[in-house]
Image (cartoon, rainbow, N blue to C red):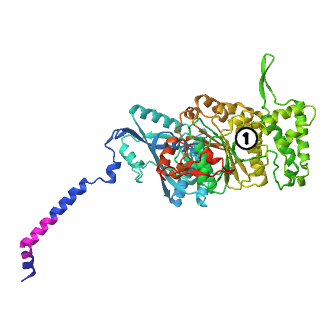
Amino acid sequence: MSIFGKKDKQKLDPAVQAQAVRQQEQQEVSAAFQKGITALRDFIAPSSLKFDNSYFQLGTRIARTFYVYGYPRQIFTGWLSSMVNLDEVMDLSIYIYPVESQVVLENLRKKVTQLEAGIQIDSEKGKVRDPGKQAAIQDAEEMRDKLQVGEERFFRFGLYFTVYTSSQEELEFVTHKIESILGQQLVYSKAATSQQEQGFNSTVPQFIDQLQIRRNMNTGAISTSFPFTSANLSQDNGILYGINMHNSGLVIFDRFSLENGNSVVFAKSGAGKSFAVKLEALRSLMFGTEIIIIDPENEYQRMAEAVGGAYVRLSLNSSTRINPFDLPKVVDTEEADNALRSNLITLHGLLRLMMGGAQTQLLGNQAAMVPALNPAEEADLDAALIETYAKAGITNDPLTHTGSPPTIADLYDTLLHMGSNGPQLAQRLRKYTTGTFAGIFSQQSNIDINNPFVVFNVRDLEDELRPVAMYIVLNYIWNKTKTDKKRRILVVDEAWQLMKYEDSANFLFSVAKRARKYNLGLTTISQDVEDFMGSRMGRAIVANASMQLLLKQATSAVDVLTEVFKLTSEEKKRLSQFPIGQGLFFAGQNHVHIQVAASPTETGLITTNPEQVKEMSAKGEIALPATPAEQSQGNIDLGQRTAPGV
């Protein structure tokens, strides 16, 4: 049988025909099934798309595409940043087409010939010299020289952008604003009339230039159009502080790269200031920076326990002791010679604070600040301090500084046996030696912190004793810093408690001013902005901080901060409206709008939100802080109790 006969027989075979029918039915079912599947384009496609003469409608949004057609003779770096930073929804596309240099050189040669011929004809006709032609020849000749030696290249440049608004009125307003911004720089744009569809296709990210409206530009001119010149605070080294809300970039910064490593953080209660500082401390710790924190509200215990840090609880019931008469063990000869003198000055401020600090009294018909000690009492106190150190065998000679230092109890005894004002001053110190506040600061120090993360908790101290404790702890930390110049960050939370007293404010300012020399960065946190900025020392501390973070503020504090930080009207308006975790981040001369961002793990370690803490403890994700009874059992308390059910 011939092959044609076989084929005819197969065509007539019912089994073959049935198989063919089944395959066709399967293909039809498969095609119908594919039509019912939701693809990615179905998710991103708008509900409708309607093009008009000068605008188009994309779903519920009204949009318009523009092209730039005119540029000035000279254009400067960053001219496009005003568009990038504009607070409007916008798509912007830049098309750059390289052109062969030889072709450009030939065209420039012809152009120069035409211009020179035109100038000569005008001269022969007695016409006035045309400056425009002279400038064009000069630019063309300069470009020819640079192209010839390969210093520049030539390109065709196209710039299009599409703005999206909610209504026709808003579209006209934004159009006028954009044209004004560009017009101030002699850059002119037009709406793509009757070409809105082509303009839309040219600005979506698919690299299709359907408008093809281009301008000749050399390398230098195109480089000024680099779009990523918006407010930026990002370095190769440093830690992540948050997200730059201007351009969605990352704020990665090393505070020690500035003139000094000091920082101030201002915000109202609940705005996220402690969260931001704890996040910075946690990330800095990973890069080898030591962290020391003065914690007045027990907010840092959980984080200290998580990183294996030391948690020092100061209270009248605790066995922790810090002696303010301790001297730093410095190696530097000059520092060693001045160690005693420097500590005496610090002790003068501390003792004035202990004896009541400067007080406001009515003198005549006016209120005036009256010092805690008059000049005679100051002189007697100074003599008593020197004598107290001398009795312990400590003089200005650095070789004597290794001996056991005296205590406040020794000073009390010296004053008691002095003439003049000594006994009276001793009576004012009695509560710190044998009275209510005895023990905590009147004995030899029994702590020697050797840990990269240390928290001093002063929450359980009485309100009257807390500023004194913060002052003494600061001095202890300062002496340790001078002994070992490692990179450290010192966090003073609720610093307004120190700023209430002039002596403690002066000491904090002294630390801020000298911290850079000892590789220390001071972070000052306060929610009482008006009181802090209202003091002379408070303003000085801010002036000596190269980094500032301003989160959401109370309305009454906005005007104060606007004056100090020279904020714009827009920044002033936002300062009282920022959501939690957003604010203004200043570093040197630059500042950006920042969103503090943390990972879920970091959030679990540092959050103080009661609802979040309760939820995480119930799930067993975190441990509850130790009770006061458990904390009082040791000098450095690292105890914790497990959440129920864990």
- Is 11 in the magenta? yes
Amino acid type at image mark 1: Ala
Q: Secondary structure at mark 1?
A: helix
Residue toward you, 69 or 177: 177
Dominant SS of magenta comes to helix
- Left/right placement of residue 438 relative to residue 223 reads right
- For the point 63% across and 57% down, the residue is 287
- For residue 141, say whether it is visible: no
- For the point 76% across and 33% down, the residue is 502
Residue 424: x, y in percent? 86, 31
Label 1: how many Cα within 10 Å (few below 14, some 14–19, many 20+): many
Residue toward you, 125 or 613: 613
- Residue under pointer 1: 469
- Left/right placement of residue 521 relative to residue 166 reads right
- For the point 66% across and 47% down, the residue is 632
Residue 336: x, y in percent? 86, 52
Outermost residue, bottom side: 1
Residue 56: x, y in percent? 36, 40
Magenta stretch bounds: 9-23
Which quadrant would residue 162 be assigned to in this image? top left
Which quadrant would residue 12 be assigned to in this image? bottom left
